[in-house]
Image (cartoon, helix red, strand yellow):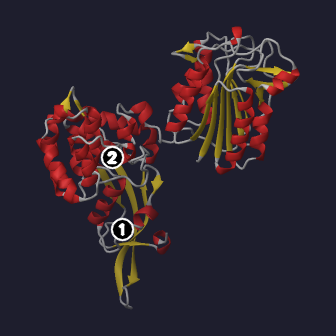
């Protein structure tokens, strides 16, 4: 979902109204949104002039997006029933209705823009105090209803105060948000519920977050695009390896040549790589080399040879029970060059060779590494690589029948597959699209093994009738 985020953080208010962590909060949120792939407008210490400029920019861009986010960290208050988010020029200690309007952003201005926009989901997050100068003034925010398709989240309930500190250089509220916002497949409502519990517990019950929602559909901040940020001990440049740029040294040249899709470059790169000592390559570059050995192994014989002798080739890269080359290979199977889960397009090169290592204690941590990452996607996978095996039972309902041979009136015996059920899911249509109609039971099992991306020995096929010549009904074959 294409998303626009407007992020504001204000510290440098006048006199006693200064804050310490609002800019830290806003910068951290902007960074997270960028890592999630959102387009971000970020501004710190906004002035009165900036208020109108940002509103105009937000209004101009929002219709190009499916979703919008507005985040504000700073002083907030209500005056004469209006909710305001103060610029640093707002005279917080001496307010009247005129200087409020000229030196702040009104919440209703944001919601008015949203109401006119074509976005499907809109999220407003306000980490501003609703009582006292802890982050605000003596007036609390007034009750405010969310427009259709919008959730408004406040760091406190009406009448409560919010602290400017409390969690590692952040407010308690934004600190809690940062802990949860990278959690894969966590809906926005679930996220704010978890944040509410954390804020309540860490503030000893003195601060309770509050939301008002009119969302109809679900929204997930992270659908897998940010998995590296919470689960993977490698730099973003090698997890999202499309971002990797060579610095020109020997090892970077190996990486660039392996990813070239040109075996005249890939094979010499593998020769050089095989001569190197493991200590010459840091863990990040071992990880990306592992990824690129796998992706090039379908073309370059040097990479294929490495995979064919995988156990012996990997041994020298074991350090503190970790193997970053193998970690990279396992990661490449499931995630693309943007760090996104491949879903129906797993890279299935040499799975038998790679998965065979799951029993080897030398590589235990590598299989724990990928197993933990894949937990967020377990409902989309039939098999997760691990040393603790589970048999995958596949029930195939087959009916024997006679059909006309192609270009002939003569009849032949076939076994029509009526259903293929695995883990409660019917995959008949998917298998029919990749299955040769002349195959037998052994052939069908090979197709299933590849489709499930699982070791052959774990796939248990149960057929109601032995398949000698497979046949799918036309409605199954049609796309």
Which residue is depicted at the point 39% across and 91% down? 409
Residue 148 visible here: no
Q: Earlier in the sequence, mark 2 or mark 1?
A: 2
Q: CA distance from mark 2 to mark 1?
A: 26 Å
How far from the left and from the top, in percent, is residue 8?
A: 64, 29
Q: Which residue is label 2 attached to?
A: 332
The residue labelled by disc 1 is 435
| Helix, strand or loop for disc 1 | loop
Q: State the residue lying farthest toward the front.
A: 49
Q: Position of residue 110 (x, y in %)?
A: 75, 36
**Quadrant in the picture for residue 431:** bottom left
Q: Position of residue 2 (x, y in %)?
A: 59, 47
Please indicate whether residue 189 sits to the left or right of residue 78 in the image: left
Viewer-nearest residue: 290 or 451:
290
Query: On screen, 391 above or below 204?
Result: below
**For the residue carrying disc 2, how many other residues have a C-alpha within 10 Å: few (<14), some (14-19), or many (20+)?**
many
Position of 175 relative to 251 (above/below): above
Q: Is residue 76 visible?
A: yes
Could you tell me which residue is drawn at 20 percent across and 42 percent down?
250
At horizontal 25% and vertical 59% (from top left) the residue drawn is 262
Comparing 275 with 448, the one in front is 275
Q: Is residue 157 left or right of residue 409?
A: right
Closer to viewer: mark 2 or mark 1: 2
Residue nearer the viewer, 360 or 17: 17
- Residue 36 position (above or below residue 453): above
Where is residue 276? Give x, y as percent: 13, 39
Which quarter of the picture shows residue 470? bottom left
């Amino acid at each position: 979902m294409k998303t626009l985020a407007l992020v504001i953080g204000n510290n440098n208010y006048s006199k006693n109204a200064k804050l310490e962590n609002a800019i830290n909060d806003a910068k951290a949120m902007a960074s997270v949104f960028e890592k999630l792939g959102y387009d971000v407008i970020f501004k710190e210490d906004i002035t009165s002039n900036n208020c109108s400029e940002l509103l105009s920019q937000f209004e101009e861009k929002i219709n190009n997006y499916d979703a919008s986010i507005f985040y504000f960290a700073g002083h907030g208050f209500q005056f004469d029933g209006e909710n305001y988010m103060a610029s640093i020029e707002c005279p917080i200690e001496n307010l009247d209705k005129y200087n409020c309007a000229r030196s702040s952003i009104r919440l209703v201005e944001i919601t008015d823009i949203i109401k006119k926009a074509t976005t499907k989901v809109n999220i407003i997050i306000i980490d501003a105090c609703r009582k006292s100068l802890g982050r605000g003034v003596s007036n609390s925010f007034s009750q405010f209803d969310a427009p259709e398709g919008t959730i408004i989240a406040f760091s406190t309930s009406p009448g409560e105060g919010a602290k400017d500190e409390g969690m590692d250089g952040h407010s308690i509220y934004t600190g809690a948000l940062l802990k949860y916002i990278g959690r894969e497949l966590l809906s926005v409502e679930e996220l704010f519920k978890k944040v509410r519990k954390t804020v309540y517990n860490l503030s000893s019950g003195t601060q309770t977050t509050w939301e008002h929602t009119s969302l109809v559909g679900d929204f997930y901040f992270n659908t897998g695009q940010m998995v590296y940020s919470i689960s993977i001990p490698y730099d973003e440049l090698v997890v999202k390896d499309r971002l990797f740029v060579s610095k020109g040294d020997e090892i970077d040249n190996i990486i660039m040549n392996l990813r070239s899709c040109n075996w005249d470059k890939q094979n010499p790169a593998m020769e050089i790589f095989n001569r190197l000592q493991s200590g010459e390559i840091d863990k990040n570059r071992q990880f990306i080399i592992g990824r690129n050995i796998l992706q090039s192994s379908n073309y370059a014989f040097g990479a294929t040879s490495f995979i064919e002798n995988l156990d012996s080739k990997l041994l020298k890269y074991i350090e503190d029970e970790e193997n970053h080359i193998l970690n990279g290979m396992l990661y490449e199977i499931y995630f693309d060059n943007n760090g996104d889960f491949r879903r129906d397009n797993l890279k299935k090169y040499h799975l038998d060779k790679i998965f065979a290592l799951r029993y080897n204690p030398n590589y235990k941590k590598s299989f724990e590494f990928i197993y933990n990452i894949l937990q967020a996607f377990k409902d989309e996978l039939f098999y997760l690589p691990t040393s603790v095996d589970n048999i995958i039972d596949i029930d195939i309902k087959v009916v024997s029948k006679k059909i006309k041979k192609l270009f002939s009136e003569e009849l032949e015996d076939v076994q029509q597959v009526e259903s293929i059920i695995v883990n409660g899911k019917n995959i008949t249509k998917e298998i029919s699209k990749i299955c040769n109609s002349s195959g037998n039971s052994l052939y069908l099992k090979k197709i299933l093994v590849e489709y499930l991306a699982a070791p052959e020995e774990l796939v248990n096929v149960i057929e109601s009738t032995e398949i000698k010549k497979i046949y799918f009904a036309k409605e199954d074959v049609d796309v």
